[in-house]
Image (cartoon, grey):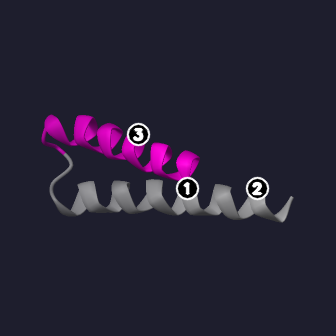
């Protein structure tokens, strides 16, 4: 059970980091959401195969 919580916290932290990063870089650019989604997929795959 503790592992699941850590996994959730890690993913939440990654998501929050991406949102904060996109805001810092000017999140109004149309490419940002796509880049975020791509990076999120890459991270998710990393976490799955880790």
Quadrant in the picture for residue 23: bottom left
Q: Give me the residue at 66% from left, 55% from top.
A: 8
Q: Which residues fall within the magenta stretch?
A: 28-50
12 up-or-down from 45: above or below = below
2 or 1: mark nearer the eye: 1
Q: What element carries label 2?
A: helix
Residue 49, magenta (yes or no)? yes
Alpha carbon of mark 3 to alpha carbon of mark 1: how far? 14 Å
Residue nearest the viewer, comparing 28 with 50 = 50
Give the image location of residue 25, x and y in percent: 16, 59
Label 1 sits on residue: 50
Label 2 sits on residue: 4
Q: Residues within 10 Å of mark 3 (few under 14, many from 20)?
A: few
Q: Give me the residue at 34% from left, 62% from top.
A: 20
Give the image location of residue 42, x and y in percent: 38, 44
Farthest front residue in view: 49
Label 3 sits on residue: 41
Residue 22, magenta (yes or no)? no
Q: How crowded is mark 2: few (under 14 residues within 10 Å), some or many (20 or more)?
A: few
């Amino acid at each position: 059970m503790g592992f699941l919580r850590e996994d959730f916290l890690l993913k939440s932290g990654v998501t929050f980091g991406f949102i904060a990063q996109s805001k810092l870089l000017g999140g109004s650019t149309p490419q940002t959401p796509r880049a975020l989604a791509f990076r999120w997929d890459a991270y998710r795959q990393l976490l799955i195969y880790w």
